[in-house]
Amino acid sequence: GRCARCILDRRVRDLLGDAGGEIRPELQALYHALTGTERPDTAASWLARGAVPSVLQNLGTGKPITHDLLDGLPAGKPVEHLRSVLVSIGTLPPRDEQMTRLERWVSVTISGRSDPDEQQLLHRYATWHLLRRLRRRTSGEETTHNQLVAVRQHVRAATVLLDWLNARNLTLVTCR
């Protein structure tokens, strides 16, 4: 118990603190959130994995942390947990994570198409029909997992239709 807490405190000070281990005032809430956990050994192992240590070191040097910074890191549970901690203590503003995931997936899916005309068509369909309608439905509430799945199914169905048309040398215009 006590030794694990000491190890955790030292690790967090190494990551967030200056050369003397002092924590800047704007990082005090994060320091207390990390060191005040009920399971210090679990927190210490989490702080040793993936991109989390380097993100925390960047915080310690005064670089601002944003959702975009975290979005640029390899996706996974450690980064998701760090984001949730930063949101819960007010360091980051809340955002709709399902919608963000969905927007990223739509972008990757569409950019994977080789035909620029198809990319444009799918982009318009996904952005102006599916995502706009979803945003209107959620009207400030968080997107649910089922809503995310439904939009993905619609985008996949559109790509299947385009593939089917291509295989038959048809287009949406010539298809009846």
Image (tube, grey):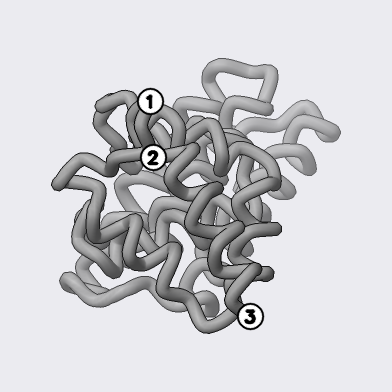
Residue 29: x, y in percent?
24, 60
Q: Which of these two is toward me, 113 or 37?
A: 37
Q: Residues within 10 Å of mark 2 (few under 14, many from 20)?
A: many
Q: Residues within 10 Å of mark 1 (few under 14, many from 20)?
A: few
Question: Residue drawn at (25%, 65%), measured in percent from left and top?
Answer: 89
Q: Nearer the viewer, mark 2 or mark 1?
A: 1
Q: In what element is the residue under mark 1?
A: loop
Name the kind of residue labelled 3 in the image: Gly
Residue 1's disc is 3
Up-down relation of residue 67 to residue 117 (above or below): below
Q: Quadrant of residue 61?
A: top left
Residue 135: x, y in percent?
26, 64
Name the kind of residue labelled 1 in the image: Ala
Q: Which residue is mark 1?
A: 19
Residue 85: x, y in percent?
39, 63
Residue 135's disc is none
Observer able to see residue 24:
yes
Q: Which residue is mark 2?
A: 16
Q: Which of these two is toward me, 176 or 131?
A: 131
